[in-house]
């Protein structure tokens, strides 16, 4: 069976919690592991997962990085969802909330977006099979283990994926820095998929053409735009605010 090496306290511990991967071995650095790494290793042992104690340089060699935080694990590949799994779970009355990432090629941006997506309750993420960063152990590390819980599927054609979502009653909102409509005047309360484009060129033209709406983040200052992961966090949290808290009364701060 093909395997890969997770590294870092959060990816290993969250993968254990999620229970979606098969664990073959856990590696703990001798005399270098933190209390959290040792606690995670103890949990693995309680699940009858073989534990090997290695020298720090040996763990660096196995994981391919010095940023392993004293722990690693040999596990089965990331359990990708099928696009149909995500589509078939879309129920308009349940107000689905999806994320479409069009050509995000930097693993750090993908990891950061996945971390934000899990925090706001995204129901599923779709990314293209080509021209995209993939859900590797590095992405799990950047996501602080959020990847281990999120439902993520690869699609061959993003436009076709958008068409399939529209058939199921989902509205498509694409992020475009030149769009006139602000995210703060957009109603995110409908069954929704947010599209975030690649780091340099944004959403591809054909994908943009099939969006129902194009929205932007207002900003001041001299920088031209936020990067993909920062923009994604802003728009996802505005959607989250509207969908979860819009009707709550705002309490004004008072000095005592």
Image (cartoon, rainbow, N blue to C red):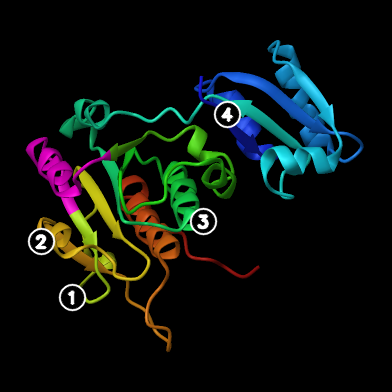
Of badges 1 and 3, nearer the viewer stands 3
Q: Nearer the viewer, residue 3 or 199?
A: 3
Q: Which residue is mark 1?
A: 180
Precedes in sequence: disc 1 or disc 2: 1
Label 4: how many residues lie within 10 Å, few (<14), some (14-19) or many (20+)?
many
Residue 160 part of the magenta segment: yes
Q: Residue furthest right?
A: 31
Q: Which residue is mark 2?
A: 209
Distance from disc 4 to disc 1, alpha carbons, whole Å, reads 41 Å
Of badges 1 and 2, nearer the viewer stands 2
Of badges 4 and 1, nearer the viewer stands 4
Residue 164 part of the magenta segment: yes
Precedes in sequence: disc 3 or disc 2: 3
Q: Which residue is mark 3?
A: 108
Q: Residue furthest bottom?
A: 222
Which span is picked out in magenta?
155-172
Left or right: 94, with 135 as reference point: left
Question: Could you tell me residue 41's position as x and y percent?
Answer: 76, 25
Precedes in sequence: disc 1 or disc 3: 3
Secondary structure found at label 2: helix
Q: Which residue is mark 4?
A: 15
Q: Nearer the viewer, residue 84 or 18?
A: 84
Left or right: 204, with 118 as reference point: left
Precedes in sequence: disc 4 or disc 2: 4
Label 1: how many residues lie within 10 Å, few (<14), some (14-19) or many (20+)?
few
Q: Residue, x 17% and y 51% (percent of image)? A: 172
Distance from disc 3 to disc 4, alpha carbons, whole Å, reads 19 Å
Question: Could you tell me residue 149's position as x and y percent?
Answer: 48, 32
Label 3: how many residues lie within 10 Å, few (<14), some (14-19) or many (20+)?
some
Precedes in sequence: disc 4 or disc 1: 4
């Amino acid at each position: 069976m093909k395997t890969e090496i997770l590294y870092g306290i959060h990816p290993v511990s969250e993968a254990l919690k999620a229970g979606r991967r098969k664990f073959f071995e856990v590696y703990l650095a001798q005399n270098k592991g933190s209390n959290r790494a040792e606690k995670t290793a103890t949990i693995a042992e309680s699940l009858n997962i073989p534990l090997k104690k290695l020298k720090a340089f040996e763990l660096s060699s196995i994981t391919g990085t010095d940023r392993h935080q004293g722990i690693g694990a040999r596990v089965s590949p990331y359990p990708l969802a099928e696009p149909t799994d995500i589509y078939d779970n879309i129920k308009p009355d349940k107000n689905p909330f999806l994320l479409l990432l069009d050509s995000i090629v930097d693993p750090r941006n993908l990891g950061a977006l996945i971390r934000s997506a899990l925090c706001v309750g995204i129901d599923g993420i779709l990314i293209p099979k080509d021209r995209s960063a993939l859900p590797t152990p590095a992405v799990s590390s950047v996501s602080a283990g959020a990847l281990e819980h999120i439902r993520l599927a690869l699609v061959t054609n993003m436009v076709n994926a958008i068409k399939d979502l529209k058939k199921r009653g989902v509205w498509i909102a694409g992020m475009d820095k030149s769009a006139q409509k602000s995210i703060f005047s957009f109603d995110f309360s409908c069954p929704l998929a947010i599209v975030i484009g690649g780091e340099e060129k944004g959403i591809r033209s054909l994908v943009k053409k099939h969006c129902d709406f194009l929205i932007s983040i207002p900003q001041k200052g001299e920088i031209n735009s936020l990067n993909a992961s920062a923009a994604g966090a802003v728009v996802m949290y505005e959607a989250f605010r509207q969908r979860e808290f819009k009707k709550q009364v705002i309490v004004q701060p008072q000095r005592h």
